[in-house]
Amino acid sequence: MIKNAKQTLEWRRSNVLELSNEGRSESDIARILQVRVATINTDIQFLKREAKENIRKYIDERLPFEYPKCLVGLDSIVCKMSDILSNADSDSRDILQATSVKMQAYVSYDKVS
């Protein structure tokens, strides 16, 4: 495909995605972009396949590393909040905030594990 045609295709698909995100129908998008509804349908099918590929790639390549990082981060938060709670110099506001954050970390930990 020549460069200009590829750029036009990418531009159209980008606009299809944006207009679809606004809640417009395929016929509205076709009218706005001055193309056939079948062209918009083809673009939407392409965008869906591309989105599925991106999700699959994220799940296969990135998520396995992000999950343990999340758990380590939550453990770190719990430890820091425990330090605040056990510190004799902590005032009541710090203790209340640390307790709240620690509880939220536990809830988050339960959701990811």
Image: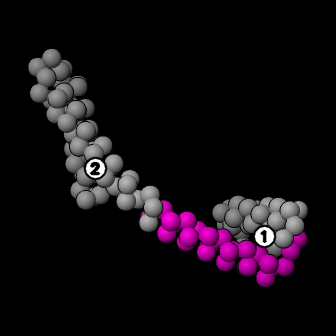
Write down the region rendered in magenta: 32-59
**x and y percent of residue 55 in the render?**
51, 66
* Residue beneath disc 2: 71
Q: Quadrant of the N terminus?
A: bottom right
**Number of marks in picture:** 2
Q: Residue 57 lies in magenta, yes or no? A: yes
Query: What is the number of the mark on residue 29?
Result: 1
Amino acid type at circle 1 is: Ile
Q: Secondary structure at mark 2?
A: helix
Q: Main secondary structure of the magenta part?
A: helix
Residue at x 25%, y 52% (from the top left corner): 109
**x and y percent of residue 18 in the render?**
70, 60
Image quarter of residue 111: bottom left
Q: Is residue 110 left or right of residue 64?
A: left
Residue 98 in view (yes/no): yes
Residue at x 55%, y 65% (from the top left corner): 54
Amino acid type at circle 2 is: Leu
Mark 2 or mark 1: whose residue is earlier in sequence: 1
